[in-house]
Amino acid sequence: METSKYIPNQLVRVGFFFALMLSVFSPTAQAKSIVLNLSSKSDTSSRSLALQSYESLLIEGITAVSGDNSTIITSSSAAASSQQNNSVHLYSNVIRTPENEQEYYWITPVAAFPCDKATQQCSSNVVENKDVSLSYIVLPKKTQYQDLAEQLALSASEFKVSQDFASLSSMIVDDLSSDDPNVVFSYGILSFVGALPADTDNLWVISDLVPLFSEVGERGEVKGLAVDFVNSVLSDVGMSPTILFAPWQRIAKESITKSNVLVFSIAHTEEREHLFHWITPISRNLHGLFGVNQSYYDNFDDVPRTLRIGGLKNDYRIGVAASHGFFTQSYDSWDALVSAVFDKQIDAIFASQGAIDFACDVNKQPCETIEQIAPYQISSAYLALSKRETSLVVVEKLKLASARIKRSDEFRQTANKWSEMVNEHYHFAHYIENGVVHLWKKQQ
């Protein structure tokens, strides 16, 4: 088998795109270098060399999808790079197991191999009644890398549904299949164990209720933009189930105790990270302090502690404000909270831009005068899948379906019609980018 065409510069051209991504999506972690640690180079078999090259080409494909045009430089010595301060390591060929599940952000699966339990660590929930190792590209799980990990994972799914990936995967299979007839790509995974099963017939689909995204219609059905998106994803994987709805407490309980529970739209938080496979974001919301005729601060920590901060009772943000030394006041309703800032009972509301736009009644109050005075953080609401005994291949099947739907003309038209309706009837700031609704005004 000819392998030289896979092994030129690609094996070492892996670098500064990740440094750029880290600076954009995780400003708290300023890395001097990022190293991609490829599969072991001590194995010089044709399969291993081809796999190393495929890993590198996969990374280059993810880079291209992201739209980054920066130069990729040589960074082939992990040992040397690890000595640099603040270097960040992206690893390939990491076998996913129950023991290391919480150690990494699992960016995208690379390959599935036969596994001998007597001598190897095997992955769980890949193929029923068969021992398989599933390798991934990963980032170490550190809070400051979460945004970077999300961006890489989304770019990976988008690349894997592209024509470029179809061409790459066909070339890899053509060259490897002469030595191994079981080689095939299944759901973006290079499989050395044949086609990988991904049964989605037993998914249980539950929605949290969010106005305009997933709400109960006149006939008791769930409707909204998020519902339209999820229905399209389910249709793509050959399903047409009834979408149920429940409060978050019920969703959390079912997700912890049962497998194959597909839920939306739930906030992706650090506390919930280990409970779900995070399939794709549906919306993003900008949280911060909002007031009338107040000075603007670039950072939350710069806001004077003399400001009086209001929020809803039992809202986590009231606790955040109090822990930062602010005087806080809680209110029973959004109407009372918004009225309090106009009546000067408080100086600022700790909320999201979307909540402010929903809560303020333009017919009663000068809502346009409420402006953000300091950002806090951006949160994402996701389509997610319960982790308990749920197939990792099903996870990838849903990720790829989500990427296809977000690229489709049909969903773009659906989202644009929804946006026009919102502009006409609700007048709250938003924009749609890469299939995700951002609930704040787009910066020019």
Image: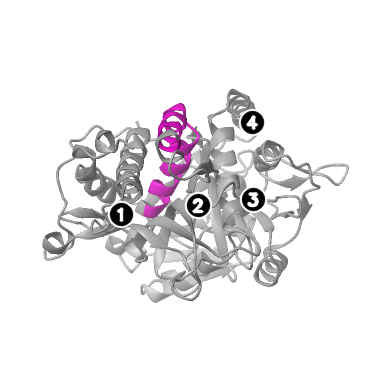
Q: Which residue is mark 2?
A: 380
Q: Are marks 3 and 1 in contact (CB under 8 Å)?
A: no
Chosen colour scheme: one colour
Q: Quadrant of the C terminus?
A: top left
Q: Which residue is mark 3?
A: 197
In the rendered view, would you say 241 is above or below 248?
Answer: above
Residue toward you, 368 or 73: 73
The majority secondary structure of the magenta stretch comes to helix
Q: Which residue is mark 1?
A: 26
Question: Which numbered disc flags the more N-terminal residue, 3 or 2?
Answer: 3
C-alpha separation, residue under disc 4 versus residue under disc 3: 36 Å
Q: Which secondary structure, mark 3?
A: loop
For mark 4, does the 10 Å Cα neighbourhood hold few (<14), some (14 to 19), or many (20 or more) residues? Answer: some
C-alpha separation, residue under disc 2 versus residue under disc 1: 15 Å
Residue toward you, 150 or 80: 80
For mark 2, does the 10 Å Cα neighbourhood hold few (<14), some (14 to 19), or many (20 or more) residues? Answer: many
Residue under the point 61% across and 29% down: 411
Q: Which residue is mark 4?
A: 418
Q: Which secondary structure, mark 2?
A: strand
Q: Are marks 2 and 4 in contact (CB under 8 Å)?
A: no
Which one is closest to the eye, mark 2 or mark 4? 2
C-alpha separation, residue under disc 4 versus residue under disc 1: 31 Å
Whether residue 212 is in magenta: the answer is: no
User: Which range of residues does the magenta coloring cover?
Assistant: 149-173
Question: Which numbered disc flags the more N-terminal residue, 2 or 4?
Answer: 2
